[in-house]
Image (cartoon, rainbow, N blue to C red):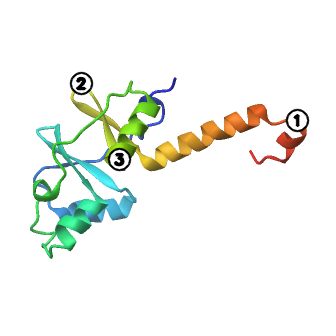
Amino acid sequence: MESVKDIMNKKITTFDVNSNVEKIANFMGRVDIGAVIITKNKKIVGIITERDIVKRVVARNLDPKKTKSYQVMTSPVESVPPEANIYYVSNIMQRKGYKRYPVVKNGKVVGMLSQTILIGYFTQQRKKFVLKYLNKRLKKEYPT
């Protein structure tokens, strides 16, 4: 059975707990990512997502230049180990409504799992299953 480490995004972006939201939002927009990890003394203390910025900054008319990440981040942050089972973590994410899940090993963020990654993984698994059981005539017609 595959684990989270096999599919997680290993490119993690962190910002300090005192970074302002404008800097974070500009970065997220520029590199097209939906979440960043917030750290204090290199330890994970929170996460900021696009939704956090909309609900906790924009909707409240806060000034993103003056608003610090610690004021709007989601904290504490739940995380999963890299060895966690993909299906187990997917179930947790679905039950709790999580769109992203940090992957932490020995107190250090080593990856991020997202709904998009899971959809891609489950689509590929389904495709493998279908191709395995299609007869030869239909396999030729099935897009790969």
Farthest residue in the right direction? 137
- Residue 27 lies, with reference to residue 138, above or below; the image says below
Q: Amino acid at mark 1?
A: Lys
Mark 2 and mark 1: span between their CA atoms?
Answer: 48 Å
Q: Secondary structure at mark 1?
A: helix
* Left or right: 37 as drawn, with respect to 71: right
| In-front residue for pair 16/1 | 1
Mark 1 and mark 3: span between their CA atoms?
Answer: 39 Å
Q: Position of residue 26 (x, y in %)?
A: 28, 65
Which badge, 3 or 2, is on the more N-terminal residue? 3
Q: Is residue 26 visible?
A: yes
Q: Quadrant of residue 42?
A: top left
**Residue identified by numbered label 1:** 136
Numbered tag placed on residue 106 in the rendering: 2
Q: Secondary structure at mark 3?
A: strand
**Residue identified by numbered label 3:** 100
Which badge, 2 or 1, is on the more N-terminal residue? 2
Q: CB under 8 Å between callouts 2 and 1?
A: no
- Residue 69 lies, with reference to residue 144, above or below; the image says below
